[in-house]
Image (tube, rainbow, N blue to C red):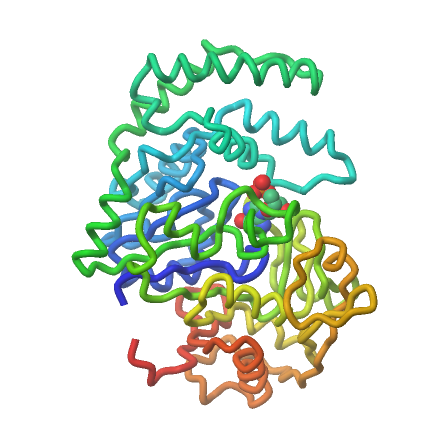
């Protein structure tokens, strides 16, 4: 399998960092195709925990080239801090490649993200306040500043002056903030430019050539399907396309290049920020998931909202991404429960839904139709052979496969790299 997309099949935080790291051992390239430092990936290697937000997990493998592709938005100060952190802890980031077409997060993007959320009050999205939405908004308004602009002072200053004239009016007149100074930003970003120069590349060409040569390429999605700007629970979404299509446009390759699309799904479900969440648990069971699953955001430290596995949403995710395999994570967290529930349908406003509803009002009013399954109440974190799983755990996994129509290929039972069960050890690829 030469080209594999690994993406979040829920609202993000499915454990993609660990999954990508698991595959990255055999990968030649790991490509981030969307999002920015709103993502948080924790990779645990032995006693060491690495929290990455921009650099792809593949950086841990010395034979792998990590790539930040053009669909990403890059805060250069954050990227350089991450590079320094890795270097300081003995990981060599020099192989990192950064697309010259990726858009830059600018100081006014961060500012606008924060003030807009305050302005929205109860209607807020609960963003990570990293400037992601405003940076993508400028990209699509065709007034974004790209990585390549850092290396052409005239273009950089011209673009910045034009855009900052508008932004300063918005900051001062709409949000009652102080204006920002062009010279300060130019000074700060020119220093970033010199340090970033060695990493900048034509990543579409690089990745396209790698695929043609049959090299192992992993595309690492950030966030998750239900946070997709087109296919998620709009407007409570991120501003990019974490779905499989985003890997193509965000890298600059075509659909025929992809061999496999792996959906990563927690054995339950969580979301951070606001927005509809049909299977959310506001009770002790939800609290147990937060406590045992360590459900606090890597980036913002916010407590994640937790609930029973939503098979309506997962089936939707399988469809919009053409999932070929599922990687189920955190099955060990469910060992706490006497009985388990999964949502097989929704009821909302007097109707019954087996497909994920498109209408915002319908989704808001959904109550899940739950199916109860027995729990197993034993520690499964040491299991590596699927034959050793308790029958109830195997039945739970088979129930998911049947409902979603996608085979579960791997199951994770703990945070360590090796705490993975190959659920189909006889599969050939
Ligand atoms: P933004 O991406 O910072 O604009 O935030 C938009 C929404 O996406 C908010 O609900 C965030 O909590 C959510 N979000 C952004 N990044 C992640 C992530 O990596 N995991 C989970 N949720 C995220």
Residue 287, visible in the rendered structure: no
| Depth check, front residue: 361 or 151 | 361
- The answer to whether 27 is drawn above or below residue 400 in the figure is above
Q: Is residue 61 left or right of residue 185?
A: left
Identify the image quadrant of residue 352.
bottom right
Q: Quadrant of the N terminus?
A: bottom left
- The answer to whether 161 is drawn above or below residue 389 in the figure is above
Q: Position of residue 212 (x, y in %)?
A: 19, 56
| Depth check, front residue: 88 or 188 | 188
- The answer to whether 147 is drawn above or below residue 320 in the figure is above
Q: Residue at point 35% right, 29% down?
A: 147
Q: Is residue 318 left or right of residue 121?
A: left
Q: Quadrant of the C terminus?
A: bottom left
Q: Residue at point 66% right, 14% down?
A: 172
| Depth check, front residue: 93 or 429 | 429
Q: Position of residue 291 (x, y in %)?
A: 67, 62
Work out which residue is located at the far left of the displayed protein and give it: 213
- The answer to whether 77 is drawn above or below residue 64 in the figure is above
Residue 84, visible in the rendered structure: yes
| Depth check, front residue: 258 or 97 | 258
Q: Position of residue 219 (x, y in %)?
A: 36, 55
Q: Residue at point 30% right, 18% down?
A: 152
The total of numbered circles placed on residues is 0
Q: Residue at point 56% right, 78% down?
A: 400
Q: Is residue 194 left or right of residue 234?
A: left
Identify the image quadrant of residue 174.
top right
Q: Position of residue 121 (x, y in %)?
A: 77, 35
């Amino acid at each position: 399998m030469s080209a594999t997309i690994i993406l979040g099949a829920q609202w993000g935080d499915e454990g993609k960092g660990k999954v990508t790291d698991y595959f990255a051992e055999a990968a030649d390239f790991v490509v981030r195709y969307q999002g920015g430092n709103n993502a948080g990936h924790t990779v645990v290697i032995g006693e060491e925990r690495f929290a990455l937000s921009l650099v792809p997990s593949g950086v841990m493998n010395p034979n792998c080239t990590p790539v930040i592709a053009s669909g990403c938005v890059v805060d250069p100060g954050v990227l350089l801090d991450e590079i320094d952190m890795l270097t300081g802890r003995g990981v060599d980031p020099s192989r990192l490649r950064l697309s010259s077409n990726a858009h830059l997060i600018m100081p006014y993007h961060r500012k606008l993200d924060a003030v807009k959320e305050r302005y929205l009050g109860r209607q807020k999205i609960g963003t990570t306040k990293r400037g992601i939405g405003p940076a993508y908004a400028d990209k699509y308004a065709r007034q974004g500043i790209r990585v390549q602009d850092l290396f052409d002072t005239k273009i950089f200053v011209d673009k910045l002056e034009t855009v900052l004239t508008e932004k300063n009016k918005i900051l001062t007149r709409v949000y009652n903030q102080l204006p920002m100074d062009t010279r300060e930003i130019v000074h700060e970003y020119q220093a970033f430019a010199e340090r970033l120069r060695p990493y900048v590349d034509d990543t579409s060409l690089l990745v396209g050539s790698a695929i043609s040569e049959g090299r192992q390429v992993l595309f690492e999605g950030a966030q998750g399907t239900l946070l997709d700007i087109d296919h998620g629970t709009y407007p409570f979404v991120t501003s990019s396309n974490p779905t499989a299509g985003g890997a193509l446009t965000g890298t600059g390759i075509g659909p025929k290049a992809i061999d496999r699309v792996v959906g990563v799904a927690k054995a339950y479900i969580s979301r951070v920020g606001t927005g509809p969440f049909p299977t959310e648990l506001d009770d002790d069971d939800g609290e147990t998931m937060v406590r045992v699953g360590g459900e606090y955001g890597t980036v913002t430290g916010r407590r994640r909202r937790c609930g029973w596995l939503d098979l309506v949403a997962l089936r939707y995710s399988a469809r919009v991404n053409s999932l070929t395999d599922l990687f189920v994570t955190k099955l060990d967290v469910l060992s706490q429960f006497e009985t388990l529930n999964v949502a097989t349908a929704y009821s909302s406003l007097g109707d019954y839904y087996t497909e994920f509803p498109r209408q915002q009002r319908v989704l808001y009013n959904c109550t899940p139709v739950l199916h109860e399954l027995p729990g197993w109440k034993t520690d499964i974190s040491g299991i590596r052979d699927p034959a050793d799983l308790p029958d109830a755990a195997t039945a739970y996994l088979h129930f998911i496969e049947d409902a979603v129509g996608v085979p579960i290929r791997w199951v994770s039972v703990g945070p360590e790299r090796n705490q993975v069960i190959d659920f189909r050890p006889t599969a050939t690829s």
